[in-house]
Structure formats: C-alpha cells, structure tokens
Image (spheres, grey):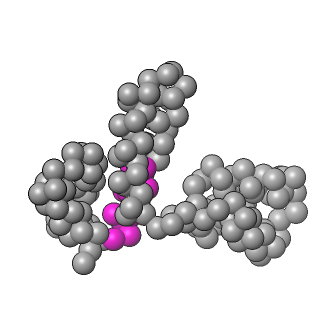
Amino acid sequence: MTLQEQINADVISAMKAKEEVALRALRGLKSALLLAGSEPGANGVVSDESALKIFQKLAKQRKESLEIFVQNNREDLAKVEQEELTVIERYLPKQMDEAEVKSILQGVISEAGASSAADFGKVMPLAMKALAGKADGKIISAVLKQLLS
C-alpha cells in the first residue's frame, strides 16, 4: 500500500472514529498529495519518496509555527500545531538522535577529506544527501559545525 493509499484509508478511519484532530491533519496531508499529483507529468500518482518529502516539509512548517506560537505565548495555536505534527510524524521514518548523526557525519567528513570549518560548504551537501529524511537539517548543520571546528 502506497503512502497516498494509506492516507486515504486513514482519513476514512478517522471520519468513522470521529477523531477531529487526526482528521484535520490527514486532510492537510491528503490535500498536499493531491496538489503534488496534479502537477504536470504526475498523472495523479505521487511516489512514496515524493510523499515523504512533502510530509517532511509539512512537519517542518508545523515545527516552525509551533516555535513562533510558543515564543508569542499563543498556547491555543501551539496546541493545534503540536497535535497536527504528532499525526504527520506517524508517516515519517524515525529520526536519528544526535549521537547517530555524529557517527555518520564523521564518516562523511573522512570521505570528503575535510579538516577545518572552511570545508563546511563542501561537506554539508554530502551530509544532507547521506542523512536525507533521517535527521533534521538544523541538527546536521550544528553537529557538522561542531565536528569541523
């Protein structure tokens, strides 16, 4: 079952169970998938790889909004974003912790032959490719700066 089919099935389940929070988030995911499927050349089908990228983008948006709402003491809006983020994260692969990221980045650094902070621009694209979908870009960047300094 593709992610697109899974989302459609989960929307129906959430409707039947009257889970308003899950339904709101799932409708957002379904909408994003339909939009991606309507692009030229997509023929209404979105690959799982593309769907994961879409879900990661939506999760990132929710995290950024959540931070802003918390900073501005808008707990009501922060709660909504957190609820939707929790639902979206069900469909994303498990994120690596900082120790796992560090060990992979050490390998990437040695392969690239990097030795100083000046090599950050050379190593970062390789690191993002190696950890695509497995870790947040902010964590990758922070750990990489730490390792190269």
- Does 130 lie within the magenta span? no
Residue 48, picture quadrant? bottom left
User: Which quadrant: the N terminus?
Assistant: bottom left
Residue 105 appears in the picture as rendered: no
Residue at 69% across / 60% down in the picture? 98
The answer to whether 92 appears left or right of 8 in the picture is: right
**What are the residue bounds of the magenta stretch?**
48-59
In the rendered view, would you say 129 is above or below 19? below
Residue drawn at x 21%, y 45% is 20
Does residue 113 lie above or below 62 as drawn? below
Q: Taken as a whole, is the magenta stretch helix, strand or loop?
A: helix
Q: Observer-nearest residue: 118 or 105? A: 105
Regarding residue 50, the answer to whether it shows in the image is: yes
Residue 59 image point, x, y percent? 43, 50
Front residue of this view, candidates 110 and 95 = 95
Residue at 38% in and 29% down = 77
